[in-house]
Image: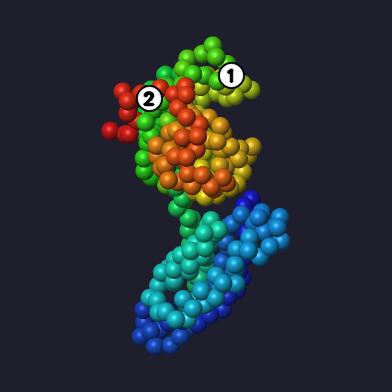
């Protein structure tokens, strides 16, 4: 379960509703908020600078609610969620807004909205079984499940470790999603891998129809299962670094502070063969 911050029973007054009396008189609104964020940095350091400043977020919500007028509870809830997501450490916000006494015989009427931060995510792709077809299919399926922003050129590389197998084709895709890293892996990447016949074994260098991995998830530093994000191998292997740099050479690595272009330049292009004859962008 992701780390959460709860702001409970925030009782404020605002102008909300469509009837004349609702537009004239302020009404009570009861607000409950659940924020999802990575609380590990603050938990390790015990430093307020590493924590989500829920006091500041609450003050901004009070200013929004009491200083504005709304027709719909849905609009108010969405605006509160936007305030929460303005903090870059907040990954998602679940906001419930209730109007006590708005409906006869009911204690309150309310709505709940959930909003997630849209993040740009770099996906590393590789295949050496029907590689050209499977890479194209993987990009097509990614585009159907996320917003596809860009696809790198394709590079042919020699296999690592187990060398008695076909050469690999490697590339990278840049997508935008509001899914968490874990949800992106379980709901998008792994289903695509299964659809394309990926069979995992103890040998991580074995031939594969497709390999889809989260290389970078915005500026986030986190863990998904046994994988670290950013992928540490970006700093070691040209077949990962070069396609990522092709997508966004000025993107800054959240751990080292290097740009992707600088990492790719440092590692060089040894062992990479550009394949301009293969285009992956969906037709």
Identify the residue at horizontal 46%, vertical 17% (top origin). Answer: 167
- Answer with the quarter of the image where residue 145 lies: top left
Residue bearing mark 1: 161
Q: Left or right: where does residue 108 sit relative to residue 51? A: left
Q: In the rendered image of this protein, does residue 278 appear above or below residue 214?
A: above
SS type, badge 1: loop
Query: Can residue 222 be seen in the rendering of this structure?
Result: yes
Q: Position of residue 78 (x, y in %)?
A: 44, 66
Given residues 179 and 214, the one toward you in this image is 214
Quote the CA–CA distance across marks 1 and 2.
22 Å
Say which quadrant the C terminus sits in.
Answer: top left
Q: Position of residue 271 (x, y in %)?
A: 47, 22
Residue at 45 percent of width and 46 percent of height: 251
Q: Is residue 196 visible?
A: no
- Disc 2 is placed on an element classified as strand
Q: How many marks?
A: 2
Q: Alpha-carbon neighbours of circle 1 within 10 Å: few (<14), some, or many (≥20)?
A: few
Above/below status of 89 relative to 169 = below
Q: Quadrant of residue 131?
A: top left
Residue 98: x and y, percent?
Answer: 51, 73
Q: Are marks 1 and 2 in contact (CB under 8 Å)?
A: no
Query: Looking at the image, which residue is at 56% across and 66% down?
Result: 33
Local packing at callout 2 (Cα closer than 10 Å; few below 14, some 14-19, many 20+) is some
Mark carried by residue 274 = 2
Seen in the picture, residue 110 relative to 153 is either above or below; the reply is below
Observer-side mark, 1 or 2, equals 2
């Amino acid at each position: 379960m992701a780390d959460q911050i709860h702001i409970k029973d925030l009782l404020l007054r605002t102008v909300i509703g469509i009837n004349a009396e609702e537009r004239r008189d302020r009404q009570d609104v009861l607000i409950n908020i659940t924020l999802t964020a990575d609380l590990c940095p603050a938990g390790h350091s015990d430093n307020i600078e590493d924590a989500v400043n829920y006091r500041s977020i609450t003050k901004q919500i009070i200013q929004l609610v009491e200083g504005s007028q709304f027709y719909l509870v849905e609009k108010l809830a969405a605006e509160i969620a936007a305030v929460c997501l303005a903090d870059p450490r907040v990954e998602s916000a679940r906001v419930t807004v209730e109007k006590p006494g708005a409906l006869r015989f009911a204690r309150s009427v309310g709505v709940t909205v959930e909003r997630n931060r849209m993040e740009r995510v770099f996906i590393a792709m590789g295949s050496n079984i029907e590689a050209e077809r499977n890479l194209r299919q993987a990009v097509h399926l990614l585009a159907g499940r996320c917003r596809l922003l860009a696809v790198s050129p394709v590079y042919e590389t020699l296999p690592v470790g187990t060398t008695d197998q076909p050469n690999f084709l490697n590339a990278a895709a840049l997508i935008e999603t509001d899914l968490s890293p874990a949800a992106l892996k379980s709901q998008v990447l792994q289903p695509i891998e299964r659809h394309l016949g990926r069979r995992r074994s103890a040998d991580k260098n074995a031939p594969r129809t497709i390999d889809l991995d989260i290389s970078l998830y915005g500026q986030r530093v986190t863990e998904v299962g046994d994988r670290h994000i950013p992928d540490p191998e970006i700093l070691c292997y040209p077949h990962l670094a070069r396609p990522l740099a092709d997508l966004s050479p000025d993107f800054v690595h959240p751990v080292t502070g290097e740009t992707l272009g600088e990492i790719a330049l440092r590692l060089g292009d040894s062992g990479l063969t550009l394949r301009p004859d293969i285009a992956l962008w969906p037709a």
